[in-house]
Amino acid sequence: MTTASLDATSLLLLYGAMAVYAISFVSFAMDLARRSSTGSVDSRVAARVLATSSAAGATGARSGSTTTADRPERPRSVAPRPVASQRAPISLRVGLSLAVVGFALHLASTVLRGIAAARVPWANMYEFSMTGTLLIMGVFLLVLLARDLRFLGTFVTGLVLILLGISTVGFRVDVVPLPPALQSYWLVIHVFVAILATAFFALGFALSVVQLLQHSREAAAETAKSVRLRFLATLPDAVTLENLAYRLNIIGFIFWTFTLMAGAIWAERAWGRYWGWDTKEVWTFIIWVLYAGYIHARATRGWRGSRSAWLSIIGFSAVLFNFGVVNVFFKGLHAYSGL
Amino acid sequence: MSRLSESGQRDPARPDDYIDGRSDAAADDRSADDRSADDRITGPKLGAVEWLRWFWRQLTSMRTALFLLLLLAVAAIPGSLVPQRTSDPNGVAQYRVDNPDLFPVLDSLQAFDTYSSVWFSSIYLLLFLSLIGCVLPRTKHHLIALRSQPPRTPARLSRMAGFTTRPAPDTAGDATDVAPALEAGRALLAKSGYRTVLSDTSVSAERGYSRETGNLVFHIALIGILVAVGIGGGFGYSGQRVVVEGQAFVNTLSAYDSFNPGRFVDENELATYRIRLEELRVTYEEQNENAIGQPIDYTAEVSTDAAGESATADQIKVNEPLRIDGTDVFLLGNGYAPTITVRNPAGEVVFTDSVPFLPQDTNLTSIGVIKVPDGLDQQLGMIGFFYPTRATSDAGDFSAFPDLRDPVLSLNVYAGDLGLDEGVPRSVYELDTDDLTQLSGRNTDEGGIRLAPGETQELPDGLGTVSLDDVPRFASFDIHHDPTQGWVLFFSVLVLGGLLTSLFVPRRRMWLKAVPDAAGGMTFEYAALARGDDPALEAAVTDFADRHIAALDSGRGAAAATVTTAQPGPRERI
């Protein structure tokens, strides 16, 4: 097949993946709605179950899940679900299955694009979005093997859909050869690790958002106020969410540190200096400092909990800004959006 | 989360508001309030020394470090919003033209030199001061901790994380003789990398000292980077030089088009070598219809001779700089340098040179300036437009492809005073036409002069002739010397290694305790304490308890015989 037809097939597969993700998104959303109705029976009872139910969470309701690792020693890692249902509800299973199918299509599409271009599929913004969303989904599915975070399905499929939508409409470019500055093995290393870091930050961000919601719900539950977003009662408590977010974010931070260093080494080879405060370098630095602040916040009295969650959210917003705005609108040496 | 008492557990060497994962958010908020209340009470009565001490404590506190970090992130933003002199000097000049009112205000705020500005520098210097103030006592404390034994087993283990009990298996001899069992537990822990201490009724163990080591290495390496960057800036230099095919460049100060030395660079002591540009080969995309004319490859064929050595052939490519004599030579730009010769009416050459033309677009439409001060009746200035592959539209000529397919040079000719005799520096790339009379050009009666390679045409007013002899390419080289960049890399690797260790090596204390139970037998209690984030803590306790009991079950008699005389264990490896 020619480059053009390979690329066309890749695009077709990507549209297919987006369609499947869309149904998966709906299914995950229905699951949240279901959780809300279950939670409405007595959300405070559910909350109490949540707080004390290491045994129930560990033994009940988990048999139907293939993605939950069997780790009774870590009861907090399991989102307690109503003890009555022995299998995971159908909406959740459909959502997850479709997410996996969508991921397979997405992966095929990305690989085809790489074959069409005869290089790694992350040399311009379209390809970066494609691989980036692929990795967000991939890391999500991978993390599911260790932790039941299926409640994030709505968020993850939603985010991936939006990003893919924007990139196919706004960033789509035909396959063109690499400019000399990008012809380096550092393109493979530096950019891939950056994308990987982004994927981890994205999940950390999602958990921090849920953590904040959960935090306010818990505060409201203490004062016996009525509670909106009742599905939260079926999710892990805020402290558990915070710890999960922290673990994902520190993995992201390691990758980001490596991105920064690999970028500096490459910049030295390509541009003759390892650091020159180019706009993209500045923002990469800002993100690094923000997440360094986040990690420090976790060790600073008075900054745990909601405040550090906000830092995680700000950090990921900066990541999105760095990708979406700095690439397109700021002048700098990283002018590889292909637009 | 386990809610553990913090009293007595706090590291004296840590900042007062440091927590390492042993308490939850609510407790933190409370103690933070307590602390600020303390500050208020003691505040007004301080003497000079106390003030200094208070200030130092504030500076080295976690909250200050966090605040400075976030401030640093915010302070870095302006540098990405407006062009910077260091990375984009032309952008700064353009900004001045576009925003004449705003420019002086921003300039006085050093917005165009953000990263060397007073305010940015003070933030990161304070941050590093805070860092040093934090790292020094911690290093001292950690060095002591590395040489000391784990602390004694707490009285009540039931308050610790992962508290687990197991009944002691039946032993052959006295049920209350727990020493062999404890020693077995100690040995297990020691094998897992714990440093252990055995007492009559318990084992206390600690592992993961490298977590703190990694943390300290990370922070000290950051200081190392800062110092190395600072020194490198003082002793390094960078310069730019345009070299036309067939010409050579000698690494001396006078040969540079521009030169930025560090503060301590002796400009007469540059490494001496010569680089001759034999050929600059450029490949353009010709097949892919989406990218016709996109450059695929730049290769500069050069010959170099360092001091006292014979010339060697080398290549410089984008992403493949030439490392020579402690400096790095990068290929960063290219263009055309038409060779132009001007003769007077008598046919004598008054000017001949390959003049680098500045590329204006991706198809290398280029503009250059030729100044002929002597040899003709009048001083002559010419603005040249060069089209590698000329095409024409309603708006005029343009270049349709960057390679030399149908090259044409179009010249606008001016006569008058070039202003070269007043001693004012003039850019070779600009021609000030205010005091000049235009003799020929697109807008004049004469029309412009157009030349293909090899052609000669008459200058207006019978001044003489001008010819385009050849069109060689030029390469723009950046020459860098940075004596400390290897150190920066070294410290960066330490940063990454320290980070990995400090985030992923769990530091934990583990205890095993034998207590008599109501039935006259013994019960083993197991518990642990995390120092820092430790997701696997409770699993580790259960795992240890299981292994301990299993070891006791399997090796009952034999183990007892060999270890009854065991004394408190020697220190284990870290």
Image (cartoon, rainbow, N blue to C red):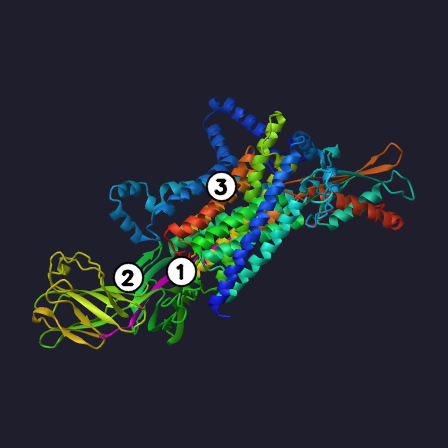
Q: Which mark is residue B360?
A: 2
Q: Position of residue A251 (x, y in %)?
A: 58, 49
Residue B471, magenta (yes or no): yes
Could you tell me which chain the residue with mark 2 belongs to? B
Residue range of the region highlighted in magenta in the rendering: B469-493
Q: Position of residue B421 (x, y in %)?
A: 13, 60
Q: Is residue B162 above or below residue B237?
A: above
As helix, strand or loop, the secondary structure at mark 3 comes to: helix
> Dot 1 corresponds to which residue?
A272
Check the picture and name the quadrant holding the C terminus of chain A. bottom left
Q: Are circles 2 and 1 on residues that touch, CB within 8 Å?
A: no
- Specify few, some or many for label 2: CA neighbours under 10 Å numbering under 14, 14-19, or 20 or more: few
Q: In this orientation, which residue lies closer to the viewer: B180 or A163?
A: A163
Residue B357 sits in quarter: bottom left
Q: Are circles 3 and 2 on residues that touch, CB within 8 Å?
A: no
Q: Is residue B351 above or below residue B194?
A: below
Q: In this orientation, which residue lies closer to the viewer: A307 or B152?
A: A307
> Dot 3 corresponds to which residue?
A314
The kind of residue tagged 2 is Gln
